[in-house]
Amino acid sequence: KIDAVIFDLDGIITDTAHFHFLAWKQLAEEIGISIDEEFNERLKGISRMDSLELILEEGNRQHDFTSIEKEEMAERKNANYVNYLDELTPEHVLPGIMDLIKSIKTDGIPIGLASVSKNAETVLRALNLVEAFDYCADASKISKSKPDPEIFLTACKGLNAVPERSIGIEDAVAGVESIKASGMFAVGVGKQLSKADYQLMSTGQLQWEKIKEAFNKWN
Ligand code: B16
Ligand code: MG
């Protein structure tokens, strides 16, 4: 029996991971730090302030700014990111996701969201997907971002689901670690995710029957 399926947002439901990258890249360039897509893998699933710290470390500038300046930089990045969100429409739901959600619902299994993004609700609204989720963990009430299991455990709790009987779907290294630390079955979409219990290269390959099969073997 599967209690719940819990989705990550950025990079799984839609490609906002790319918008986060563009916004961080611009901010980093403003302070003379250059970041590439490979470095960006480390920012996925990491909270806004923790992401900024990683970027400052990358440029060896972690001691150059006051906390007020850091807050201001994080706000600037967010304003830039939110601008990109204006372009988001239901067409930007990633391939395979709508069918997957439909199949899970047909089986009567509750669906949750485990995103540490404070913009998660705005994103779901733009995608017209608010109704699809039975429970969304509130990022503003989470004290530790991924790889800590807090966000996935909160989503499980909200759905009355036992983690060991639930499935988490993630595109980030820190996200897969968070799922595994919670005790759930981890579906990883993308490279560098060998810690996942079931790994695919793109959301278009997500098939509910195959995921169930893998979960049953693991369980
Ligand atoms: P915000 P997820 C995460 O969302 C993103 O992967 C990460 O890149 C971002 O920094 C974080 O949310 C915080 O987002 O600045 O919008 O609050 O992967 O947990 O859905
Ligand atoms: Mg993600």
Image (cartoon, grey):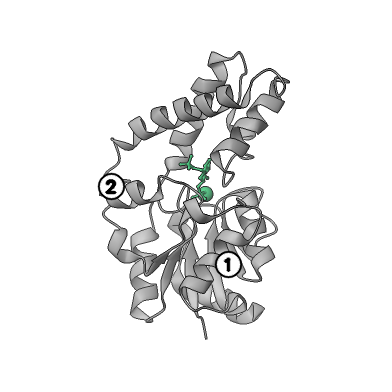
Q: Residue at x 37, y 34 (%)?
A: 82
**Is residue 24 visible in the rendered structure shown here?**
yes
Residue 145 placed where, x, y %? 60, 50
Q: Residue at x 62, y 48 (%)?
A: 191
Q: Amino acid at mark 2?
A: Ala
Q: Nearer the viewer, residue 139 or 42?
A: 139
Give the distance between the C-alpha atoms of the residues marked 2 and 1, in whole angstroms: 26 Å
Q: Give the crowd class for mark 2: few <14, some 14-19, many >=20 residues within 10 Å.
A: some
Q: Nearer the viewer, residue 88 or 82?
A: 82
Residue annotated with mark 1: 153
Residue annotated with mark 2: 126
User: Does the Cβ of the disc 2 residue fall within 8 Å of ligand 1?
Assistant: no
Q: Which mark is residue 189?
A: none
Contact between labelled residues 1 and 2, with CB atoms less than 8 Å apart: no
Q: Earlier in the sequence, mark 2 or mark 1?
A: 2
Residue 187 placed where, x, y %? 57, 63
Callout in the foreground (2, 1): 1
Query: Please, what secondary structure does the residue beneath circle 1 have?
Result: helix
Q: Quadrant of residue 71?
A: top right
Q: Quadrant of residue 175?
A: bottom right
Q: Give the crowd class for mark 1: few <14, some 14-19, many >=20 residues within 10 Å.
A: many
Left or right: where 68 falls relative to 203: right
Q: Nearer the viewer, residue 150 or 12?
A: 150
Residue 211 placed where, x, y %? 52, 71
Query: Please, what secondary structure does the residue beneath circle 2 have?
Result: helix
Q: Residue at x 49, y 21 (%)?
A: 26
Q: Amino acid at mark 1?
A: Leu
Residue 2 placed where, x, y %? 51, 81
